[in-house]
């Protein structure tokens, strides 16, 4: 883990300085590798994870480590907020299907209840992008796509939600000003230029939520395209031209990185399950990689490809840190069902990949129910490097899966497009993203496996339904 991180279940915290140091390294490496002079960088945009909360004092200094997005200590606070405001009201106001411990509103209430001194001293509550905008420009600014999951942002007014602010006991003055993604904020200050190795001639523009940037980076800028990112989390994006409030209360709606557009966006634990498998069970593969052999993930891929579809009956719920919509359950954990003496290590690797793919199918299924068309899947993030996993996704969904030439750095490209449009270099996000997005590989579905995966999806739904009460019982023990 990075220096400064604390990850004691269910707490996940990281010192602000660790983020700053990582940003410095990223800027330095980008300039050195590209060979571009810092004086020639016209604008900069940021792709940022959502929900990570910073508490700053009146001098803009962090009062405590940032509470990372996946931290779920605030379950009691989330439940209390939902009791006060009602799930239906929360959904229709924010676009999110209900309260969760990971939402910043829940985290702020936890601070009020458990760290009252910190809460009282906090002058500004900021998210990661907001924090770096402040460091770079001295301005307090945020944007719609990142604020969507704070639960104190209103999807109808695109402003802060007064009822939630009153419930939390905070003021709008403690939050940054709201703008559209891509909005120019200001040039790099002399102090920031010195600290981060940038030029004061560089314009800083708002970026967007990492998943919104990633969608832009692979050309997912119109309805019909479904992009999915299998990284630490599994996340999916489908574009819509207006807010969609799911009558079933299952699927959330976000503002996209394109002003005036929205996205049906779902997320759950994903790639972290296969990383957990690698780190826990693949010491030999990791040792071989470190000795100059093939990458451990490539070795896992080869093992998965040699294992039959369906993993000889093994069924996996891959929720090592809770599950997200459409099957939201903060208490969900990993489950390996139907294990026999015939199952080997490779069966578990394939079972995890297929289990995550079932989560993806639930996202596609629930997106379509809302009337949003899905014609193809565009894959990005680490999971897109796995040929075995991409083929499983194609076979299970019956859709072509494309990796893009822009897959490797899709979110960064999306932020760059927003910054370029904000600086007037390009005319529109949609036109630029469509022009830059090029197919790399295509995985065509093998229809002979479709019936198997339909049964597997049915098994997944049943297992989630049956296991949910037990998850809650064990969490309360």
Image: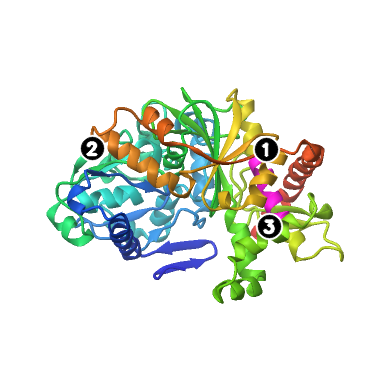
What x and y, as percent, mark residue 443?
Answer: 64, 41
- The local crowd at label 1, few if under 14, some if 14 to 19, many if 20 or more residues have their Cα within 10 Å, is some
Q: Mark 2 near mark 3, Cβ–Cβ under 8 Å?
A: no
Q: Is residue 332 above or below residue 142?
A: below
What x and y, as percent, mark residue 447?
Answer: 77, 36
- Give the camera-side residue of 114 and 23: 23
- Residue where numbered disc 1 is placed: 444
Q: Main secondary structure of the magenta part?
A: helix
At horizontal 79% and vertical 41% (from top left) the residue drawn is 449
- The local crowd at label 2, few if under 14, some if 14 to 19, many if 20 or more residues have their Cα within 10 Å, is many
- Residue where numbered disc 3 is placed: 334
The answer, for residue 477, to whether it is visible in the render is no
Q: Is residue 31 above or below residue 255?
A: below
What secondary structure is marked by label 2? Answer: strand
At horizontal 41% and vertical 58% (from top left) the residue drawn is 67
Q: Is residue 392 left or right of residue 439?
A: right
- Residue where numbered disc 2 is placed: 184
- Which is more N-terminal, label 2 or label 1? 2
The answer, for residue 238, to whether it is visible in the render is yes
- Which quadrant of the structure image shows residue 193? bottom left
Cα–Cα gap, marks 3 and 1: 30 Å
Numbered range of the magenta stretch: 350-361
Q: Is residue 437 left or right of residue 174?
A: right
What x and y, as percent, mark residue 379?
Answer: 55, 43
- Give the camera-side residue of 137 and 174: 137
Image quarter in which the C terminus is found: bottom right
Cα–Cα gap, marks 1 and 2: 41 Å
């Amino acid at each position: 883990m990075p220096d400064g991180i604390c990850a004691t279940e269910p707490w996940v915290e990281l010192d602000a300085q660790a983020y700053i140091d990582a940003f410095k390294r990223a800027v330095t490496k980008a300039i050195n590798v590209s060979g571009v002079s810092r004086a020639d960088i016209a604008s900069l945009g940021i792709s940022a994870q959502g929900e990570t909360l910073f508490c700053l004092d009146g001098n803009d200094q962090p009062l405590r480590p940032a509470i990372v997005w996946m931290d779920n200590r605030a379950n009691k606070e989330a439940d209390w907020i939902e009791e006060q405001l009602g799930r239906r009201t929360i959904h229709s106001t924010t676009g999110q299907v209900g309260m969760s411990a990971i939402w910043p509103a829940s985290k702020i209430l936890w601070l009020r209840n458990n760290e009252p001194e910190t809460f009282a001293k906090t002058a500004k509550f900021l998210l990661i992008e907001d924090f770096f905008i402040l460091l770079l420009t001295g301005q307090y600014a945020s944007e719609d796509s990142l604020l969507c999951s704070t639960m104190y942002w209103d999807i109808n007014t695109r402003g802060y939600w007064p009822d939630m602010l009153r419930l939390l006991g905070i003021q709008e003055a403690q939050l940054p000003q709201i703008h559209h993604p891509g909005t120019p904020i200001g040039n790099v200050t002399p102090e920031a230029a010195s600290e981060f190795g940038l030029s004061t001639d560089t314009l800083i523009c708002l970026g967007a939520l990492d998943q919104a940037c990633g969608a832009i980076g692979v050309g997912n800028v119109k309805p019909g395209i479904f992009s999915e990112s299998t990284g630490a989390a599994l996340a999916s994006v489908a574009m819509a031209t207006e807010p969609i409030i799911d009558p079933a209360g299952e699927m959330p709606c976000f503002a996209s990185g394109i002003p005036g557009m929205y996205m049906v966006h779902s997320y759950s634990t994903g790639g972290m399950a296969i990383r957990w498998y690698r780190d826990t069970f693949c010491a030999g593969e990791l040792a071989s990689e470190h000795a100059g052999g093939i990458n451990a993930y490539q070795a896992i891929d080869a093992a998965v490809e040699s294992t039959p579809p369906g993993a000889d009956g093994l069924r996996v719920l891959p929720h090592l840190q809770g599950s997200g919509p459409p099957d939201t359950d903060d208490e969900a954990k990993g489950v390996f069902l139907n294990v026999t003496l015939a199952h080997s290590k490779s069966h578990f690797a394939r079972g995890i990949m297929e289990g995550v793919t079932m989560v993806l199918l639930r996202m596609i299924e629930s997106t379509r129910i809302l009337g949003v068309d899905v014609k193809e899947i565009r894959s990005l993030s680490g999971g897109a490097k796995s040929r075995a996993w991409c083929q499983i996704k194609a076979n299970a969904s019956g859709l072509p899966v494309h990796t893009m030439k822009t897959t490797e750095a899709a979110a960064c490209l999306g932020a760059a497009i927003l910054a370029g449009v904000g600086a007037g270099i390009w005319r529109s996000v949609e036109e630029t993203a469509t022009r830059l997005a090029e197919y790399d590989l295509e995985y065509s579905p093998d229809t002979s496996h479709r019936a198997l995966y339909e049964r597997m999806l049915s098994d997944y739904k049943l297992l989630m339904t049956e296991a949910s009460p037990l998850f809650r019982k064990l969490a309360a023990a």
